[in-house]
Image (spheres, helix red, strand yellow):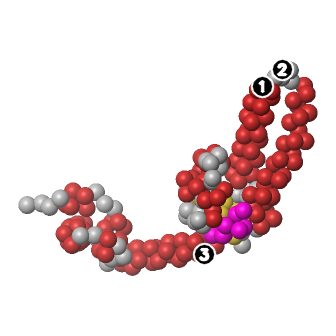
Amino acid sequence: MENDFTKIMSNRSDEELIKIVTVDIGKYQELAIETAKKEIKLRNIDSTRFKEVAEKVEAEKQKLEKLENNTVHSKIRFLNFLIDFTIIFVIYFMIIPNIETLLSLTNQTERAIYRITTLIIFIATYYIVFEHKYQKTVGKIITKTKVVNLEGEKAELGDIISRTFCRLIPFDRFSFFFTRNGFHDAISKTKVIKDN
């Protein structure tokens, strides 16, 4: 009679099975572990694979620890924010009023909608271009930090876009005072680390 884990373990890769019976053994029920061992025996997985997997897991663990140790604190994150928003607002208010004079905005409502819309577009463009192309904004260049994904690699464009628009969440800036990674980091699965 097969147990419920037989089909599950038969769909696992060799590496996943080895992890289950070695490094992740404490995360599984005894019956799941026994089923994984039977699947390993059934596949006749060579014992040298165990050492390879253990080395790979250890290397990944060290990489994640290094990434976590290099994650910057809220004071630096807030400094990045102040630098970037100062630059954004200075450039914005140098450009937008000049363009506004060319448009025929007839009332305060139209002007307010135009300003809010262009400000959001301006902020989004600034962050998306800088963080996707260079992994850093001007603030991050000054503080010697950069944006990475959770594996410590360059974040994808989709992650940067998500990260940028998550900045519009109310109180996002204050989330850094309670955790190391704010809302826009957690949601987009990114981090800001020291750029060594």
Residue where numbered disc 2 is placed? 106
Q: Camera-side residue: 7 or 196?
A: 196
Q: Is residue 72 magenta?
A: yes
Sequence-wise first label, 1 or 3 = 3
Q: Quadrant of the N terminus?
A: bottom left
Label 3 crowd (10 A; few <14 / some 14-19 / many >=20): few
Q: How many marks?
A: 3
> Is there CB contact under 8 Å for labels 2 and 3?
no
| Residue 48, percent from left and from top | 36, 78
Question: Is residue 92 visible to us here?
Answer: yes
Query: What stretch of residues is rendered in magenta?
Result: 71-78
| Residue 148, percent from left and from top | 63, 61
In the rendered structure, the answer to whether residue 94 lies left or right of residue 174 reads: right
Most extreme residue toward the left is 1
In the rendered structure, the answer to whether residue 172 lies left or right of residue 32 reads: right
Residue where numbered disc 1 is placed? 110
Quarter where residue 41 is shown: bottom left
Amino acid type at mark 2: Thr
Estimate the spatial distance between the alpha carbons at disc 2 and disc 1, rounded to whole Å: 7 Å
The disc label shown at residue 69, or none:
3
Q: Is residue 139 above or below residue 126?
A: below
Estimate the spatial distance between the alpha carbons at disc 1 and disc 3, rounded to whole Å: 48 Å
- Residue at point 70%, 47% (across, down): 128
Amino acid type at mark 1: Glu
> Is there CB contact under 8 Å for labels 2 and 1?
yes
Amino acid type at mark 3: Asn
The disc label shown at residue 145, or none:
none
In the rendered structure, the answer to whether residue 33 lies left or right of residue 14 reads: left
Q: Quadrant of the C terminus?
A: bottom right
Estimate the spatial distance between the alpha carbons at disc 2 and disc 3, rounded to whole Å: 54 Å
